[in-house]
Image (cartoon, rainbow, N blue to C red):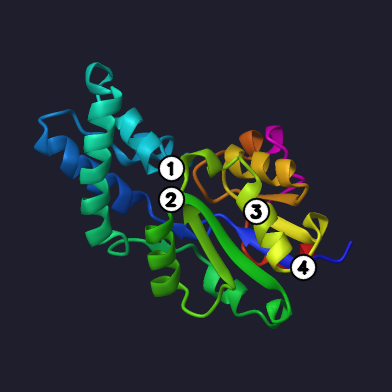
């Protein structure tokens, strides 16, 4: 199979956004006199969207729908101001995206982060590199729902089997499987190689440059 497209996850795959996300949520928690969390803890909150992260970060006694919604709006407002403050590409990502081997390869970002913030981060950190950047606009379409991934393949006039789906989480690998795309896990993100393989990863790469070999 000759692969003609790549869909990348964002957080934990292309960029390390852990500090900006964690800092924004901790500002909200501090303002409510709730306990804050460490970066290591937030690492396991990331992956299912920021609303889900908010529900996990709140104390159990305050994690009801009303409080989650209020804190989510506060967190988004805080994070919007600082979402590219500490967020940086992982080692080798910019070199990968500039590799001549990708010139004729379609590329997109598909994230469970809010669509507005996904587009903002991609446009500021990776200007001109991606054909599409899709974030979460409807909760029901959140990964591992493959709807958006399949929609991207249709827009590109490619079959799902012609597309690599690259991510750092079990949710990304499940999305790839659900979309009939080729699941590639990355070991530098927020989950372990064992978790990635258990969730369907065909290959787990340790360096961004290894993706060229798969192509």
Q: Residue under circle 1?
A: 49
What whole-number distance in Å separates the C-alpha atoms at marks 2 and 3?
15 Å
Q: Residues within 10 Å of mark 1 (few under 14, many from 20)?
A: some
Q: Compare marks 3 and 1 and give the one earlier in the sequence.
A: 1
The secondary structure type at the circle numbered 4 is loop
Indicate left or right for 59 with 177 as reference.
Answer: left
x and y percentages locating residue 14 in the rendered image: 51, 61
The image's mark for residue 22 is: none
Q: Compare marks 2 and 3 and give the one earlier in the sequence.
A: 2
Q: Are marks 4 and 1 in contact (CB under 8 Å)?
A: no
The secondary structure type at the circle numbered 3 is helix
Q: Residue furthest right?
A: 1
Tell me what residue is drawn at x 43 percent, y 50 percent. Answer: 113
Q: Residue under circle 4?
A: 157
Q: Residue under circle 2?
A: 113
The secondary structure type at the circle numbered 2 is strand
x and y percentages locating residue 68 in the rendered image: 28, 31
Q: Are marks 1 and 2 in contact (CB under 8 Å)?
A: yes
Nearer the observer: mark 4 or 2; the answer is: 4
Q: Residue under circle 3?
A: 149
Q: Are marks 4 and 3 in contact (CB under 8 Å)?
A: no
x and y percentages locating residue 26 in the rendered image: 21, 41
What whole-number distance in Å separates the C-alpha atoms at marks 4 and 1?
28 Å
Tell me what residue is drawn at x 23 percent, y 37 percent. Answer: 71
Bounds of the magenta span? Answer: 197-205
């Amino acid at each position: 199979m000759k692969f003609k497209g790549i869909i990348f996850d964002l957080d934990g795959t292309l960029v390390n956004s852990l500090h900006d996300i964690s800092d924004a949520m901790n500002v909200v928690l501090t303002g409510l006199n709730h306990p804050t969390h460490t970066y290591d803890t937030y690492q396991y909150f990331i992956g299912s969207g920021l609303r889900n992260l908010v529900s996990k970060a709140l104390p159990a006694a305050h994690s009801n729908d009303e409080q989650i919604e209020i804190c989510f709006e506060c967190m988004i407002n805080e994070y919007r101001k600082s979402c590219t403050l500490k967020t940086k590409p992982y080692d080798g990502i910019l070199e990968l995206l500039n590799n001549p081997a990708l010139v004729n390869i379609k590329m997109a970002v598909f994230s469970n982060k809010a669509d507005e913030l996904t587009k903002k981060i991609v446009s500021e950190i990776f200007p001109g590199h991606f054909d599409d950047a899709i974030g979460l606009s409807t909760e029901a379409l959140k990964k591992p729902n493959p709807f958006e991934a399949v929609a991207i393949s249709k827009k590109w006039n490619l079959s799902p089997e012609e597309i690599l789906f690259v991510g750092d989480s079990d949710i990304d690998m499940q999305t790839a499987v659900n979309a009939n795309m080729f699941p590639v896990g990355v070991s530098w993100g927020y989950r372990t190689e064992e978790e990635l393989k258990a969730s369907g990863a065909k290959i787990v790469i340790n360096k961004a440059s290894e993706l060229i070999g798969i192509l």
